[in-house]
Each structure stands twice: as structure tokens, then as C-alpha cells.
Image (cartoon, rainbow, N blue to C red):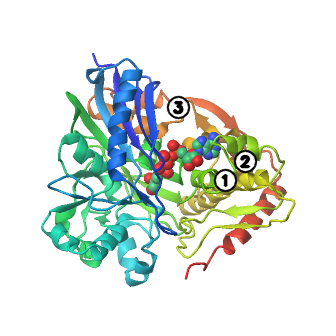
Amino acid sequence: MKQYVGAIDQGTTSTRFMIFDRSGAEIGRHQLEHRQIFPASGWVEHDATEIWENTRKTIDAALTGAGLVPSDLAAIGLTNQRETVVLWDKASGTPVAPAIVWQDTRTSSMLDTLDGALIRSRTGLPLATYFSATKVRWLLDNMPGLRARATRGEVLFGTMDSWLIWNLTGGKHLTDVTNASRTMLMNLGTLDWDPDLLAHFDIPRAMLPAIRSSAETYGEALPGVPIAAAIGDQQAALFGQTCFDPGDTKCTYGTGGFLLMNTGSSPVWSSHGLITTVAYRFGDEKPVYALEGSIAAAGAAVQWLRDQLGILDSAAASETVAGQVEDSAGVYFVPAFSGLFAPYWRPDARGAIVGLSRFHTAAHLTRAALEAICYQTRDVVEAMAQDSGTALDRLRVDGGVTANDLCMQLQADILGVPVSRPAVAETTALGAAYAAGLAVGFWESVGDLRANWREDRRWQPTWTAERRSEGVTRWRAAVDRTLDWTM
Ligand SMILES: Nc1ncnc2c1ncn2[C@@H]1O[C@H](COP(=O)(O)OP(=O)(O)O)[C@@H](O)[C@H]1O
Ligand SMILES: O=P(O)(O)OC[C@H](O)CO
């Protein structure tokens, strides 16, 4: 009997393949970072071919490292960075342009020409550069002859899930409903491409994949091993955290930060700057929806200190460096590299570091970066409380940044509620594995999965209410200083 389920987790920073057993314990993994390409200020690109090659390599290396062969896997689940746009030539399977990453802001001037009310009412999404549609349109507008080829179905569009499914299955053009809900082209009510939005963006339907549920057989990834789930990474983390009931909430801190609350079988529209999105859908069952607060730069702020300023040797070093000082000594760092997402939705914002004097060191700046991750999360937690009418009493966290214990302590301090990290912090991959395992009967029910969730560590708030309130006031003042910055 097959004892394991695999998961491809194609993130913004890296791609990993993970193998889990029936108890949800990790049996093997391999991970590879890919290049972050910044051709101009505000542009962020990936090489989709590099990502596909890394995917293949991580599957092989994880299986070999764990001493397993493909036939040991009951199924593979796929989860991915969302919104990022890949366009490829149908005949050759080669990308026609670099992938435009969700953080890319090159389309900001297009926003003024679009109907925000129409888009919001059909998709649950605010007008922002974040989502796929403006990026697809930009490529069609800027690459001569591309729109005609796309109209003839010769050039295909997909988010990363589609691109990987195409390659894994030898040419199936599919996406799942959670990824489709981030394109700005899917109608949240019909769960199909919206003809009015396609016309509004001038995007030909012939280039779009077919929309499937999050848990069903997509094809074979390896001989005898089905891809039995595809689900956006933040929705997968919600699943991996076993947030199956309305009101269940988690926050994932990767390159960006993403707080999602399960809202059950009806979409809930936000009045406080959150996104309405599909959480998951099983086969023909009714979809489950979520409210989401998306933060554009969380771990990306640490990456920037490491890669662009060179003041950290590694992301992990941010903990020791920030730990050299008691506090940020009045420095606030707003990493609005891609503008500000939830709850502000200000594409005109750009990053700022305020409050500097000659006294300040790399340690203060690093601590301010960690605090920024936590203040941004507080902003979306507040919006979520206003929309749902319920204050959070504990925050379940996961993702790369949660390895940083100091940052998680700061998060509890800045939120004023406990922060809880599960034993398996790789909940994104775990969620994809869970969805695939449920689809093929490896797990019987979500009840089996709930029983697998265990807490690893909990942080209690230590700041006084006065200190917290002063910090939030200063943070909001710093946010104000980032606005109206683009030409
Ligand atoms: N110990 C750490 N402290 C702070 N940030 C970290 C730490 N380890 C990783 N990160 C950050 O987490 C991000 C990677 O997390 P991950 O969950 O793998 O992201 P993604 O899914 O976006 O690829 C990077 O931005 C990195 O800078
Ligand atoms: O790669 P992550 O984990 O930062 O997630 C990216 C999100 O899917 C973007 O919406």
C-alpha cells in the first residue's frame, strides 16, 4: 500500500518538493531558490523555464533523498505563488516572455483606465497591479503580434499552476478555481471566466485554461502518480492549518504575508480593504470562500536587506542582528516596494525608512524590518476584525519567516494576542498534500487531518497596551509618508 503523498510548493522565492506520511509528518524534501529579476524599478520577473526545471529537480532529489521511488506516492498536490503570469507558445511549449510576478507594478498607469466597480463586483478584488489581468494585458499590448496569436489560441496564458500542470502532464491546459479567482477575470458567482471582464481587458478567451476544482485528478505527474490537487499557496496554507470552519484564520509569512479567514459557503464582501477569494473547492461540491488580507512585502523586506543592501549574510541572521538591540530606537521601515496592498491598496506608495539619526545601526534597521512585518499584519488583523465583527483571540502562523522566534515574539507584542506556530511549519505544502490525499482517498475526511494538527510553540504578548498603541500610531504616521510617491 502506498504510504506517502507528495507536494510541489512553487513559491515566490523557491520551489520545494515535500513528502508526507499519513500522520502529516515530513518524510523528505528538496528545495531550490530561483532568480529574482528586477529589470527596472517596480518590475519583478521570473524565468518560468528555470522554475519548471527546478520543479523537476526537486521532485527527483526529494524522492532520492528519502530513499523512495515514484510508486511509493499515492498522489501529488500542487500549490503555487498566485497571480504571476506566464505566457507560452502552444506548439513549442516555450515561454514567449519572462513571467511577470505578482509584486510587479509596471501596470500601475493602466489602473486609471479600468472600471474598479465592475471588477470588484464580479471578482471580489480591488483595482490593483497585484492580480494577473493587467499583466496579461500589458504583454498583449506591448509584444507585437501577440494578441493575434493569442486570439488564434497559439499563445496560452496560465498562472504558475497552469504552467507546471502543462509541463507535468505533457500539455493539459488547466487551472484550479483558487488560482483563477486571483486573475481578475473569473466571476466569483459562476466560477467561470467572465465575458464582460475579458472584453474590458481585451484578453482573448482562447488563451485561457479550463477552470477545475482544487481537488481532482489533473493528469499524471509521474508514471502511475496523479496530480490530485492544485490550489493557490495561501489557500493551501489555510487548508494545511486545518482551518475548515467559518471563522478559522491563519497568517502565512513568506515573501509576502497573507492572512486568510474561512467564511464558509458564501462569499463575504469586505468594507475594510480585504479581498474576497475562493478558499478551496472539492470536486463538484460547493466552494468554500475566504476573506484575505494580502501584504506585498513580508520576508521580502529581509531579502532586500540581505541581497540589495548586503547587511545580512542570510535571512536567518536577521534574528541575531535584530536581537543586538532592545528596540528599533524610533526607526520605522515601511517596505512598500510594490505599493501597499491590504488594507490600504495604494499603488502610489513606495518604501520608506523614517526616524534615522547617526546613532542608528544595521541592527536597528533589521529590527524595524521585522517590526514592519508585524505592524502590517496588525493592520490586516484589524480590518478582518472590523469585517467579521469578531476580534481574533489567537493567530495561527506559518511560512518561512516564522522560523524567526524574535519576529514571532514581536508579532504577539504588536497584536496583543498569542501567536501559535504548528509543529509542521510547512503548512502550504502540507495543505496541497492534504487536498491531493483526500481526493484519492489516502485520507478519509478532514477529521483525520484535524487530528494531525499540533502546536510547536506559542508566544504571549509582553508589551504594555500603552507601548503597543504608541507603536501603532508611529507606524501609521510612517505609512502616511510613503503615499503619493510615484510620478
Ligand atoms: N529566519 C528568518 N527570519 C526572517 N525571514 C526569513 C527567515 N527565513 C526565511 N525568511 C524569509 O522568508 C521568505 C521565504 O519564505 P517561504 O515561506 O519559503 O516563501 P515563498 O513561499 O514566498 O517562497 C524569504 O523572503 C526570506 O527572506
Ligand atoms: O510566495 P509567497 O508564499 O509569498 O506567496 C505569494 C502569494 O501567492 C502571492 O499572492
Taking the image as shown, residue 32 lies to the left or right of residue 180, namely: right
Q: Residue at x 61, y 78 (%)?
A: 485
Can you tell which mark lies on residue 164? none
Q: Is residue 455 visible?
A: yes
Q: Residue at x 20, y 28 (%)?
A: 223
Q: Earlier in the sequence, mark 2 or mark 3?
A: 2
Whole-angstrom CA distance, mark 1 to mark 3, is: 21 Å
Q: Amino acid at mark 3?
A: Val
Q: Quadrant of ligand 1?
A: top right
Q: Earlier in the sequence, mark 2 or mark 1?
A: 1
From this view, report whether residue 23 is shown above or below residue 144: above
Can you tell which mark lies on residue 374? 1
Q: Amino acid at mark 1?
A: Cys
Taking the image as shown, residue 66 lies to the left or right of residue 362, namely: left
From this view, report whether residue 115 is shown above or below residue 443: below
Query: For this rendering, which residue is in front, 401 or 279?
Result: 401
Q: Residues within 10 Å of mark 2 (few under 14, many from 20)?
A: many
- Disc 2 under 8 Å from ligand 1? The reply is no
Taking the image as shown, residue 459 lies to the left or right of residue 467, namely: left
Q: Is label 2 in a helix, a strand or a loop?
A: helix
Q: Residue at x 36, y 24 (%)?
A: 63
- From the image, tell me which residue sits under label 2: 410
Query: For this rendering, which residue is in front, 301 or 117?
Result: 301
Q: Are marks 1 and 3 in contact (CB under 8 Å)?
A: no
